[in-house]
Image (cartoon, rainbow, N blue to C red):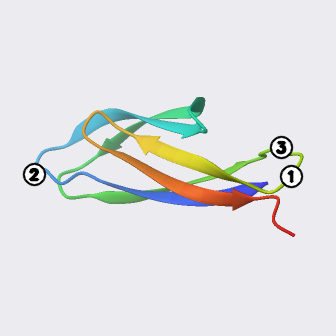
Amino acid sequence: PVTFSARVQNVGDVSDTQLVTISVDGERVGTRRLTLGGTETTTIRRQRGIGCAEPRRSSITVSTANATRSVPVDVCRN
């Protein structure tokens, strides 16, 4: 399994609720409705099994209505 964390920050001054979507290789694997106060930050931690027959590069993406961040991850390394 791959374990990762994502820091989510409300850069505004007002409390807001948004849906945070987590995807692996373009497939949605989780969602979470998150409410943060103005300028508040939190960390989301997640573990996901990524199957493979040989070493390859995978991509983990975290998205909100305002931002998307993708990070490449090498899986099944020897």
Label 1 crowd bin: few (<14), some (14–19), many (20+), radius 10 Å: few
Of 30 and 77, nearer the camera is: 77
Of 10 and 50, nearer the camera is: 50
Q: Mark 3: which secondary structure?
A: loop
Q: Amino acid at mark 3?
A: Gly
Q: Decide: is 50 above or below 27.
A: below
Circle nearer the N terminus (3, 2): 2
The residue pinned by badge 3 equals: 51
Q: Mark 1: which secondary structure?
A: loop
- Please name which of the two marks, 2 or 1, marks the residue nearer to the observer: 1
- Please name which of the two marks, 1 or 3, marks the residue nearer to the observer: 1
The residue pinned by badge 1 equals: 54
In the rendered image, which quarter contains the N terminus?
A: bottom right
Residue 13: numbered disc:
2
Q: What residue sits 72% from the left and 56% below the top?
A: 2
Say if mark 3 contacts mark 2, CB within 8 Å. no
Side of 56 relative to 4 (left or right): right
Q: Quadrant of residue 11?
A: bottom left
Label 3 crowd bin: few (<14), some (14–19), many (20+), radius 10 Å: few
Of 60 and 7, nearer the camera is: 60
Residue 5 point in image, percent of width and height:
54, 59
Q: State the separation of the CA atoms marked 2 and 1.
A: 47 Å
